[in-house]
Structures are given as C-alpha cells and as structure tokens.
Image: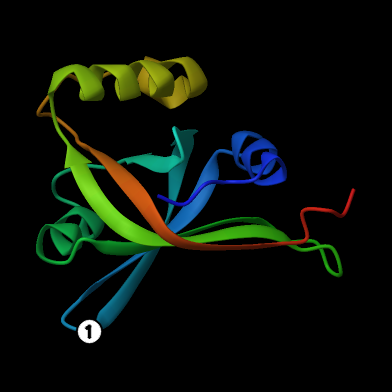
Amino acid sequence: MIEFSEREVKFLNSLEEARIATSHDDIPHVKPVSFVLDENTIIIATDYETRTYLNLKTNQNASVVIDIYKSGEHKAVLIQGTTKIIEKGEEFKKLYNIFFEKFEWVRRDPWKENKAPFLKIIPKNKTSWGLDIR
C-alpha cells in the first residue's frame, strides 16, 4: 500500500472536501465529496442511489483529488486506487464514528448500517504538489 508523507498527512487532515472520479461505459463522472484520511486510505460516505456507487459496483477503480487552488500556490494530492465498499460491521462502525465526530451534517442526519455505505479508496498511486509552500 502507498504511504503518505508527513506533509501529505497534515494537508489531507486539514481539509474535508475532495473530488472523486469514477466511470461508467467509458464516461467519466466527477463529484465533490466529504472525506477523511484513515490508515493511509481515503474514506468517503455515499448513498446507494448515486452514480458514484453504481459505477463502483461495476468498476472498482477511482481517483480522488484533494486540493486548494490559489494562483501560483496550488496545493494538491491526487490518489488513484481501488475501492472497497463498507456497509456494515466493525469497520463500518469505526468509520461512522470518525465521520460523526468530524462532520456536523452526519450529526444532523445520522444513519445506520446498510442505509448508506462508505467507500474506502486504497491508493495504488499518488502524486502531490505545492505542499512545501507556506
């Protein structure tokens, strides 16, 4: 598995929005999502009816970009990997608790196992840039 550097971990932990890219029938699909970094994986909550979820059921490959755009000082981490869908069990509970602590929208609209899954992006490749800029 890919390891993140200290700078990458600090950067990833400082943000909560990412964009995930999946595809269906050779058509790319990109959307903004909330995420957390957990044990060198990117975790995203989704719903069963989303295009992202449906895409990943047939093609587990995904890309995620987490970035801050400022002209001349762009900072980003790009991750390509495979996705595991977490719907229930101890891992679901652990991830849910992390999301519950981090995001107000989870506390406002909680859910249970098998109601909305988590996507666990396991990095195969990563690229980062601009993280040394203060």
Q: Residue furthest right?
A: 134
Q: Residue furthest bottom?
A: 26
Q: Which residue is mark 1?
A: 26
Q: Quadrant of residue 48?
A: top left
Q: Depth check: give the residue in front, 115 or 5.
A: 5
Q: Quadrant of residue 56?
A: bottom left
- Apparent side of residue 42 relative to residue 46 in the rendered image (left or right): right
Mark 1: secondary structure = loop
Instruction: Tell me which residue sits at (57%, 46%) in the image.
Output: 4
Instruction: Tell me which residue sits at (49%, 36%) in the image.
Output: 37
Point out residue 11 in the picture as x, y percentages from the top left corner. Answer: 68, 42
Q: Depth check: give the residue in front, 33 or 96.
A: 96
Instruction: Tell me which residue sits at (18%, 64%) in the image.
Output: 55
Point out residue 16 in the picture as x, y percentages from the top left corner. Answer: 55, 38
Please say if 58 is above or below 122.
Answer: below
Point out residue 112 in the picture as x, y percentages from the top left corner. Answer: 17, 19
Report the coloring of the rendering.
rainbow
Point out residue 117 in the picture as x, y percentages from the top left corner. Answer: 20, 36
Instruction: Tell me which residue sits at (68%, 36%) in the image.
Output: 10
Amino acid carrying label 1: it is Asp
Count residues near mark 1 (Cα–Cα under 10 Å), then give few for <14, some for 14-19, many for 20+: few
Please say if 88 is above or below 8.
Answer: above
Q: What is the count of numbered marks?
A: 1
